[in-house]
Amino acid sequence: MRRNREINSINKADTPLVVSMFASTVQNLLFAMILLPSALFADEFLCGIAKGYPPYQFQNTNNEAIGFDVDILKMVASESGLPLKIHQDEWDNVIGTMTFTDKLHCIGGMEITPRRQQLFDFTPPYYERKIVVFALSSNHKMNALSDLIGQPVTGDDDSSIENLLLEQGLRGDIRIKRTKSKEQSMELLASGFFQAMIAPKAVGLHLAKQQGVKVKIIYQSEHVSPVAIAVPKGNPILLNTLSKGIEKLISQGEISASYQQWFSNDIAAVK
């Protein structure tokens, strides 16, 4: 009995210490939540971006990442206090790296689709892309989607137009090929290797002007694709931090200002 009383006495004496330690732990967790993700990414916040996708994501003559999406990443990282480092690669490699490894913390300028929402979480969209089908102006056989049947076409995986072709039962009759970049797609369209090219309108017009290729638009999707920053699933603090940064930049007009520097009125920035 005496021993039990001594144990009870010790337990009662330790109770305030246990409560204090618990409170301290909770407080530390709360502080961590406030500081995150800047505390987690004190050394490096690595975000993926594509090559050969002007004017959204491409490289200058010094092989430095530039483009509208790059500017937005830099602004959001600065607003969020994150030490941004850009990892630039072919688009499929960028997606694969964040899907199958933990090396990337985000991907900039990704179109939101149902399939991608199964893999990643997204910030609010900060602009929209309009997807179209280009053909050479001199190609009088290419004038509508149905003209693509049996022809080699270059296009993105999971684009709105590819989904439309699926809905219309045409996807299986069109030979859609993927390239390493949209720059390569335009080169192959100009050479006659491809009969058409599926791409965001702004990208196709930019590359056609840059490469001196005369093109026409044979189909323009009524659907616009919202574009946002993607993060790995299961990181709500990082997602919330980037989302707040996007929302603040939109409200301050910073994203619209950057958009005006890069684009004509062919696409609409989210306001």
Image: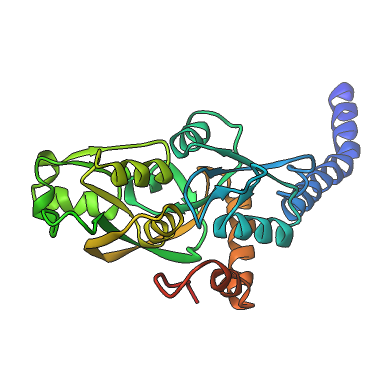
In-image side of 4 versus 176 (left or right) = right
The answer to whether one can see residue 155 in this image is no
Give how far across and how far down residue 74 sits, in percent: 67, 56
Q: Point out residue 7 in the picture as x, y percentages from the top left corner.
A: 86, 27
Q: Quadrant of residue 194?
A: top left
The residue located at (13%, 59%) in the rendering is 144
Q: Quadrant of residue 48?
A: top right
Q: Choose between 17 and 56: the one closer to the eye.
A: 56
- Asked whether 96 or 31 is in front, the reply is 96
Q: Is residue 132 left or right of residue 184?
A: left
Could you tell me if residue 63 is visible in this image?
Answer: yes
Residue at the (69%, 55%) spot, across then down: 77
State the residue in front, 98 or 65. 65
Which residue occupies 40% across, 55% down?
A: 212
Residue 35 % position (x, y): 77, 52
The percent position of residue 4, horizontal first and vertical second, equals 84, 25
- Judge left or right: residue 250 versus residue 226: right
Residue at the spot x=64%, y=57% of the render? 241
Give left or right: position of 238 versus 120.
right
The residue lying toward the viewer, choosing from 263 and 232, is 263
| Colour setup of the view | rainbow
